[in-house]
Image: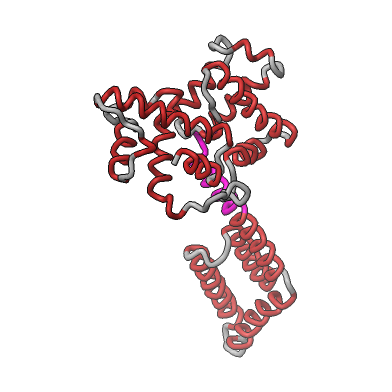
Amino acid sequence: MEEEFYNYLISMGRAPNTANSYRSVINSISRDYSRRTNQEIDIYEIQEQDVISEISQQYSQNGEYEDAGNNGHAAWRNAIARYSEFFANRGNVPENDIFNKTKRESTQAEEFYNYLISTGRASSTANLYKSSINSISRDYSQRINQEIDIYEIQEQDVISEISQQYSQNGEYADAENNGIGTWRNAIARYSEFFTNRGNIATLEHNTINKTKRESTQAENILAWKEILSSSESKDFCASILKGSAELFGQTKDAKIIQTLSNIILMVVAFVCVGFLSFYELVPKGTTGVLSGIIIGYFFKKND
């Protein structure tokens, strides 16, 4: 079962050192659980899913043995949770799947790299920070005598604690002799990324939509300006004015009636512009263009 668990972790994209660490942690949990329950328990020998799920819950956050679950910066809690997950799905786990392991759409390291690029870092800096996290993982594992892959940690408080330990005046500030502060900056940026990763996709989505809206509005404004300044538009307005003059031109007070008709037509035109603007049938930027053309044509006609 122990070997199957290791293969499962590899097939799910865990690094070999993380898989080895989780595999050995289960043995540590077995010893701890035996001591707590006063009976010899080997978790790898348990065949009941509900029993394994119960043990996983006891070592989880807010569980009865939460204090032990926090061992190794939550490595115990993560290991038993992954084992429970493996046990529940072992019928679906392909054997010898090390070379055909499941590929996630984007690994944590790649997401971190993309985050750095999106926040203005050069690709060379992003690559350096991404690889520095692996270097910090190895250094941290050596210091605490336990295999740790920072990219596999899922608890923000653990990431923040590691970042603090490698900061200036932190417990492992001496490691900052490596890369003249690169490690400190890399883990600080990773902690920042981890904190905000839930907002990154939303931010990118909103930015893209905003850019599309602004681009569409700009295109609409240019299109309306082109339409309204076209000869067809001028001819249309001129024909309306000419038609009104011809309609009332035969009357005794043709000049007065023509002026009144022009005023009425202008009011109707402005009402139409207001209607289009109120219901957002035209971009806001074109309202002034429409109004300007209307006023220009009527004044030109009256000259």
Give the image's coloring scheme.
secondary structure
Image quadrant assignment for residue 131: top right
Q: Is residue 288 left or right of residue 21?
A: right
The residue located at (29%, 22%) in the rendering is 35
The residue located at (41%, 40%) in the rendering is 83
Question: In the image, is residue 80 part of the stretch drawn in magenta?
Answer: no
Q: Which residue in the rendered view is the most extreme toward the bottom?
A: 250
Does residue 199 appear in this view? no
Question: Residue 37's x, y, as percent?
Answer: 25, 26
Question: In the image, is residue 201 part of the stretch drawn in magenta?
Answer: yes
User: What are the residue bounds of the magenta stretch?
Assistant: 193-211
Looking at the image, residue 291 lies above or below residue 43: below
Looking at the image, residue 291 lies above or below residue 87: below
- The dominant secondary structure in magenta is helix
Closer to the camera in the image, 61 or 286 = 61
Question: Residue 285's x, y, as percent?
Answer: 61, 58
Q: How many marks?
A: 0
Q: Is residue 143 left or right of residue 52?
A: right
Question: Residue 237's x, y, as percent?
Answer: 65, 77
Q: Is residue 226 left or right of residue 146?
A: right
Image quadrant assignment for residue 15: top right
Closer to the camera in the image, 208 or 237 = 208
Q: Quadrant of the C terminus?
A: bottom right
The residue located at (50%, 65%) in the rendering is 274
Q: Quadrant of the N terminus?
A: top left
Question: Residue 250's x, y, as percent?
Answer: 61, 90
Does residue 169 appear in this view? yes
Looking at the image, residue 92 lies above or below residue 17: below
Closer to the camera in the image, 187 or 272 = 187
